[in-house]
Image (cartoon, rainbow, N blue to C red):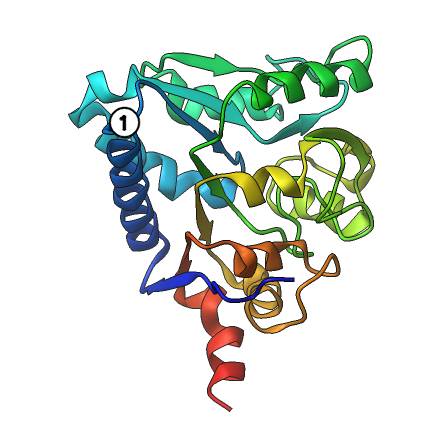
Amino acid sequence: MNIDHPPHIEIHESRGGMGIAAAKHFQSLVKECLGRVSRCRVIVGCAPSQDEFFAALVKEALAVPDLWKRVELFHMDDYVGLKEEDPQSFRTYLRTHFLDKVETAKFHLIRGEAASASQEAVRYAALLAESPIDIIAMGIGENGHVAFNDPPVADFADPVLVKVVEMDEACRQQQVNDGCFPTLSAVPRLALTITLPVFARAEYLCGIVPGPRKACAVRDALLGPIGTACPATILRTHPQATLFLDQAAAALYRAEKGK
């Protein structure tokens, strides 16, 4: 597997500083993209780890609102069985943190409540396949997942763009750690997720990863073997990836690299 393109890494003093820097970078990629094409297609992650990024991105976007009216937005995953209005739905997260404030050309919803999750995966994959994805803003999970590609289900050569997955316990526990669900038993077991080839084929990857609970995953993503044991190692296979960290998330990576 190609490892000639390790990500550019920025380490910031605080989560807020990380979010501002990531938002400015993301906005610059949108501007660059729209200098070449009529519409920019982006995918974003939805999780508390992205709060500071979205807060800063709203300010960036409102400064040039006409630019974002040419942006087509996708999200990367959602829970099977949840309706859009459910507070834990990632559609709710994205509306609350961004779409209720910024007008975009289009927002493509993953319908977690669809009667057939497998058919919904096919429908959403077809939307993604209509045209290239320009930019993905992504986090890294505590177990190294990206979107809901946990180690047991991750596949760098996945034959589909979207699939139904069973989340592993570490991933489900993270949803409790993040305060999204009260207990492990309350977390859905199934989710719809974009797959690793979607990340590989996007023109730009922009990772935003704060906090001490992500330190192990960051270290493994940047220094461990590339493979599905840590799906976030896909960042090291991409020619145009940038990773924004705060001091806490970067701590183990810096300590290991400094040995």
Query: Does residue 204 appear left or right of residue 91 in this picture?
Result: left
Q: Residue 196, relative to residue 218: is it above or below?
A: above
Q: Quadrant of the N terminus?
A: bottom right
* Secondary structure type for disc 1: helix
Query: Which of the pair 202/80 is nearer the observer?
Result: 202
Q: Position of residue 147 (x, y in %)?
A: 63, 40
Query: Which of the pair 81/6 is nearer the observer?
Result: 6
- Quadrant in which residue 113 is drawn: top right
Label 1 sits on residue: 34
Q: Position of residue 2 (x, y in %)?
A: 59, 62
Q: Position of residue 82 (x, y in %)?
A: 71, 18
Residue farthest bottom in this picture: 259
Other residues around mark 1 within 10 Å, as few (<14) / some (14–19) / many (≥20): some
User: Looking at numbered disc 1 in the image, what kind of residue is underneath it?
Assistant: Leu
Q: Residue 145, relative to residue 66: is it above or below?
A: below
Query: Which of the pair 39/74 is nearer the observer?
Result: 39
Number of disc labels: 1
Residue occupying image coordinates x 76% and y 39% = 183
Query: Does residue 26 appear left or right of residue 211 in this picture?
Result: left
Q: Residue 134, relative to residue 73: is it above or below?
A: below
Residue occupying image coordinates x 45% and y 19% = 95
Residue farthest top in this picture: 115
Q: Position of residue 180 (x, y in %)?
A: 62, 35
Residue occupying image coordinates x 33% and y 47% = 22
- Quadrant in which residue 123 is drawn: top right
Query: Which of the pair 217/236 is nearer the observer?
Result: 236
Q: Residue 179, relative to residue 63: is it above or below?
A: below
